[in-house]
Amino acid sequence: MSPPPATTPHARSRSAQASLVVFAVALLALIAYRSYGPKLSARPTDLAVTSPVNLNTGDRAELQQVPGIGPGMAERILGYRQAHGPFASVEELQSVPGVGDKTLDKLRPFLTVHAAPNPPPADAERLERKPQAAKSAPAGKGGKIQSGDAPVNVNAADLAALQRLPGVGPALAARIVETRGAKPFATPDDLRRVRGIGVKTLEILRPYVCCE
């Protein structure tokens, strides 16, 4: 039996180069996976929120980017906004079922509330042409209070009347009733005792409430 042919230096060099190429490709693949793999597999809620989401304009997808807001809570937020109008403050989020103090504290850094933008010129002209129609509109049973309406007595109003106040939904109205039951409000500033009413919310409510 003849001995196997000896490996030439040239063949050994080509084998070493091939091994080096395979090693380099594997190393690059590992670096790429560590750098981009987690980002590609992350869910929308795992991604960092680059700017606060506006509670009054955010859609379902934007709300779900906030850590702690899933599909169910996003639906409840949208439903509350549709039923009660824009949020007056981030604190009003506590009126949404499933949002308590701890949840609000976690969500607060990722949320904001901006006033609605000014109407476009066409809408502004329409409103200017019909100022009397807007002023003469009845307060409405269950409709939000309007400028010029009699203020709501927060010590005597029922739940339906309290919900006419801007930013006050069923949950917040119930907390107002509960708080005044322990001690009536002496001034509008006492509304700060109600959980969910902060400084900004109080300033929005002040023109529409009294404590007779």
Image: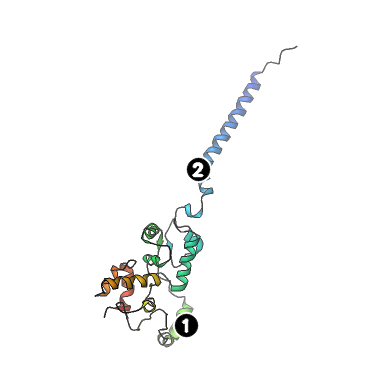
Check the image and name the residue furthest to the top: 1
Mark 2 or mark 1: which is in front?
Answer: 2
Relative horizontal placement of residue 207, taking residue 53 as reference (left or right): left
Q: Is 198 situated left or right of 80 in this image?
A: left
Please tell me which residue is depicted at 52% across the width and 39% down the height of the picture: 31
Pointers 2 and 1 in contact (CB under 8 A)?
no
Residue identified by numbered label 2: 35
Front in this rendered view, residue 173 or 2: 173
Q: State which quadrant residue 157 falls in.
A: bottom left
Bin the neighbour count of mark 2 within 10 Å (Cα to Cα): few under 14, some 14-19, many 20 and up: few
* 68 sits to left or right of 192: right
Please, is residue 169 above or below residue 128 in the view? above
Q: Is residue 109 above or below residue 39?
A: below
Near mark 1 (Cα within 10 A), the count class, few <14, some 14-19 or many ≥20, is: few
Q: Position of residue 205 (x, y in %)?
A: 33, 74
Q: In the rendered view, does 185 fall on the left or right side of 16?
A: left
Q: Which mark is residue 126?
A: 1
Q: Residue at horizontal 49%, vertical 65%?
A: 75
Q: Is residue 16 above or below residue 116?
A: above
**In the rendered image of this protein, does residue 66 appear above or below residue 26?**
below
Question: At label 2, which amino acid type do we have?
Answer: Ser
Residue 195: x and y, percent?
32, 66
